[in-house]
Image (tube, rainbow, N blue to C red):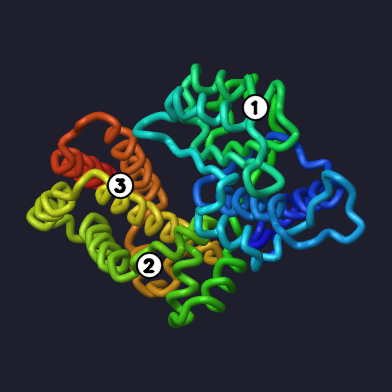
Amino acid sequence: MSLSSLIGNEQNKELLKRSLRSGRLPHALLFAGPEGVGKRQFALSLAKAVNCQQAVSGAGAGVYPEDSCDRCGSCFRIANKEHLDVVEIKPDGAYIRIDQAREVARQAMLRPMEGRKRVFCIDEAEKLRDEAANAILKTLEEPPETTLIILITATPNSLLPTLRSRCQLLNFAPLPIEEIESYLAANYKRPAADTRLLARLSNGSIGRAISIDLSVYRNARKELLELTDVLARSRDPLRLIKAAEHFGKKEREEFIDILDIWSRILRDIFSILLDQKEGIVNEDVITRLEQLAAAVSIRLISELAESIEELRRNLRVNINKQIALESLFLRIIDLQATS
């Protein structure tokens, strides 16, 4: 994809185009922002632009097309990860190793093999250990004119301050729900209700919106709506024990997803209680949410939401998920008994 065809973050898009047009592209860039908001795609689109084979009429040395043509051989090879001068570096295990960083430093000193610039896209740059970061830093301190280094991270403050200071920072924001919904509607054949729900579940990320399995989401949501109803009304011990056993068997990542879905449900109920329905995510089950809102108090929903967050934090250690859920249920029942 070319820069112009990317969705969202218009300010960054225009800044990069202006830098390309004027020939004042920095030798090092830091793309920072939440996961899934387009940082990697922006990096690859920029790599296309600096190496695009389209002619730049009247351009002087160092001036690039303000965008790629997305049709030439260079653009095609970059899109297919076959271009000799565009290199993506990712963690090998938990970290980016020192030998990976040294190889970047070595290759950065060489002239491009087929394009105008060598471009190194270092993904999850926060996983550069100090030795590896210092190897990259040496290159940034004496940058070759034909090299562009792009650091990509969701946590820029995790990088060495000296590394950050050598890069021009571009902050990437989550995409507006409306833009994601429009993109999904234009590119995927789905019912309008599904597209709307996916956009609201996306956290501002097109990649996340595309990856969500709505059938899995809706099944889990149905179970959690029923669980919330049991906690709010019947407080049936047998059903709560079965629920703790059922959810407690989930693998860690799936269990975290369950907690995320439950938190969204509670936020929606809270919005209804405050008569602020504009931001509700689960609009397609609004009637069910309103029924639950009529059966609970703000205090109960707040306590339940806080208990879920505490449970999420406790997952950092190896806890028994079933026992933790049973404890959470007992706490909510005790709260209701004293209300």
Determine whether, in the image, residue 35 is placed left or right of residue 176.
left
Image position of 260 with respect to 162: above or below: below
Count of labels shown? 3
Name the secondary structure under disc 1. helix
Q: CA distance from mark 2 to mark 1?
A: 46 Å
Determine whether, in the image, residue 256 is placed left or right of residue 138.
left
Where residue 35 sits in the image (x, y, percent)? 50, 47
Residue drawn at (41%, 29%) of the image: 95
Mark 3 or mark 1: whose residue is earlier in sequence: 1
Q: Which residue is mark 3?
A: 256
Disc marking residue 289:
2
Q: Who is closer to the viewer here, 211 or 21?
A: 21
Front of the two marks 2 and 1: 1
Q: CA distance from mark 3 to mark 1?
A: 32 Å
Mark 2 or mark 1: whose residue is earlier in sequence: 1
Residue drawn at (56%, 26%) of the image: 159
Q: What amino acid is labelled 1 in the image?
A: Arg
Q: What amino acid is labelled 2 in the image?
A: Leu
Q: What amino acid is labelled 3 in the image?
A: Ile
Placement of the N terminus among the 4 image quadrants:
bottom right
Q: Which residue is mark 1?
A: 164
Name the secondary structure under disc 3. helix
Residue drawn at (35%, 69%) of the image: 214
Work out whether residue 216 can be spotted: yes
